[in-house]
Image: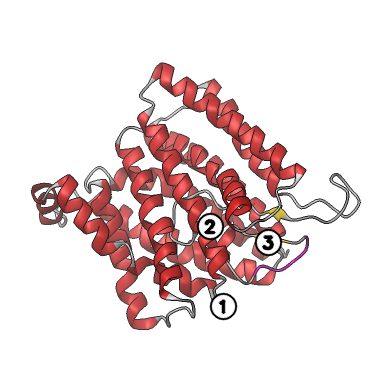
């Protein structure tokens, strides 16, 4: 991997890590369901006009959009709005990786290797410790909601693997057309027309400016720029070379949240978060032939941590040294 491309991978990790405190700021003005609807609407309109539809059946496209778009972001945004610290959310969302391995094992009959089982076990222990600690010192509901978001991401990962789109970036963009109408309807029913009207009616005020800029960041930087670079790197290098850079996302997320909000994770949560990331990284590492698990094997490439429609593009199962060109 060239120095330039390593720097580009670092840029993606920084963009996605900052995504978490940015989301928290956006939620200060927009309610969760409405924020999901607006984010995907701003992506869907230019996509329909400018990007060819991916050559996959409509049911598979709808499934990817419903899971990676609606379920992932609805639950994640609800969790943060309910009080989940944005830095901790970046750690807990790593649960999507072990969830993906387990779901792929049942749905696609993909073999779970010893390395993956060990990594999953470490990550699950870390998540249990975080959940147990939060239940003692704060509300548990935000953690549960964030885990539901990670589960939605994981199902979407496997759905994209199943769809096998010839151009993953087109699917990344076209899945955005699924969420706007259902999420706007949910927002109308759950959050109410009064709150929607207040959010949209004051969108051009000075008080709303930080949240509006953060919404644009989610669409342009985290989605278009971040996944544009990531997809390009995955088209050039083996996924096992690129994917470990995603483990830097929760590191950036925790640091960015500390700088933005003064969030300092408890020592227990920090140690458990390191266990989660370490378990995911161990499960995703492809061993050399004849080393560790006894030769080449199927290995999960861990997904990038930040919330985004293209999450599934990066999580797949591939053979050691293979080039990922098909779709997290």
Left or right, residue 70 beside residue 300: left
Which label sits on residue 239?
3
Left or right, residue 288 beside residue 307: right
> Residue 161 at what x, y percent from top left?
57, 64
Q: Are marks 1 and 2 in contact (CB under 8 Å)?
A: no
Is disc 3 surrounded by few (<14), some (14 to 19) or many (20+) residues within 10 Å?
Answer: many
Which residue has dot 2 on it?
A: 157
**In the image, is residue 67 part of the stretch drawn in magenta?**
no
Q: Write down the region rendered in magenta.
A: 320-324
Q: Residue at x 30, y 55 (%)?
A: 36
- State the CA–CA distance, disc 3 to disc 1: 16 Å
**Quadrant in the picture for the C terminus:** bottom right
Main secondary structure found in the magenta portion: loop
Which residue has dot 1 on it?
A: 166
> Residue 282 at what x, y percent from top left?
71, 42
Q: Is residue 271 above or below residue 167?
A: above
Q: Secondary structure at mark 3?
A: helix
Q: Residue at x 71, y 52 (%)?
A: 111
- State the CA–CA distance, disc 3 to disc 2: 15 Å
Judging depth in this view, the residue of 122 and 89 nearest the camera is: 122
Q: Tag count in the figure? A: 3
Mark closest to the chain's N terminus, 3 or 2:
2
Mark closest to the chain's N terminus, 3 or 1:
1
Judging depth in this view, the residue of 142 and 202 nearest the camera is: 142
> Residue 233 at what x, y percent from top left?
63, 67
Residue 85, can we see it? no
Is disc 1 surrounded by few (<14), some (14 to 19) or many (20+) residues within 10 Å?
Answer: some
């Amino acid at each position: 991997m060239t120095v330039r491309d390593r720097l580009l991978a670092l840029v993606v990790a920084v963009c996605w890590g900052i995504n978490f405190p940015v989301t928290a700021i956006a939620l200060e003005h927009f309610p969760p369901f409405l924020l999901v609807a607006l984010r995907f609407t701003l992506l869907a309109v230019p996509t329909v006009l400018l990007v060819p539809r991916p050559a996959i059946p409509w049911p598979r496209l709808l499934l990817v959009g419903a899971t990676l778009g609606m379920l992932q972001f609805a639950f994640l945004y609800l969790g943060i709005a309910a009080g989940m610290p944005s830095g901790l959310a970046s750690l807990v969302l790593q649960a999507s990786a072990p969830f993906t391995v387990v779901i792929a094992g049942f749905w696609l009959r993909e073999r779970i290797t010893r390395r993956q089982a060990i990594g999953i076990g470490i990550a699950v222990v870390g998540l249990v410790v975080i959940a147990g600690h939060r239940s003692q010192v704060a509300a548990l509901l935000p953690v549960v909601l964030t885990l539901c978001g990670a589960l939605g991401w994981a199902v979407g990962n496997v759905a994209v693997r199943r769809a096998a789109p010839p151009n993953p970036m087109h699917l990344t963009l076209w899945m955005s057309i699924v969420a706007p109408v259902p999420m706007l309807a949910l927002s109308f029913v759950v959050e109410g027309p009064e709150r929607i009207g207040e959010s949209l009616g004051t969108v051009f005020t000075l008080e709303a400016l930080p949240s509006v800029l953060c919404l644009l960041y989610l669409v342009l930087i985290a989605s278009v720029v971040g996944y544009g670079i990531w997809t390009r790197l995955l088209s050039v290098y083996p996924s096992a070379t690129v994917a470990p850079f995603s483990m830097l996302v929760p590191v950036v997320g925790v640091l960015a949240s500390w700088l933005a909000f003064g969030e300092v994770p408890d020592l227990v949560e920090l140690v458990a978060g390191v266990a989660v990331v370490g378990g995911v990284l161990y499960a995703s590492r492809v061993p050399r032939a004849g080393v560790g698990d006894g030769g080449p094997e199927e290995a999960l490439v861990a997904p990038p941590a930040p919330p985004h429609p293209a999450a599934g593009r990066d999580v797949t199962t591939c053979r050691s040294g293979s080039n990922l060109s098909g779709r997290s």
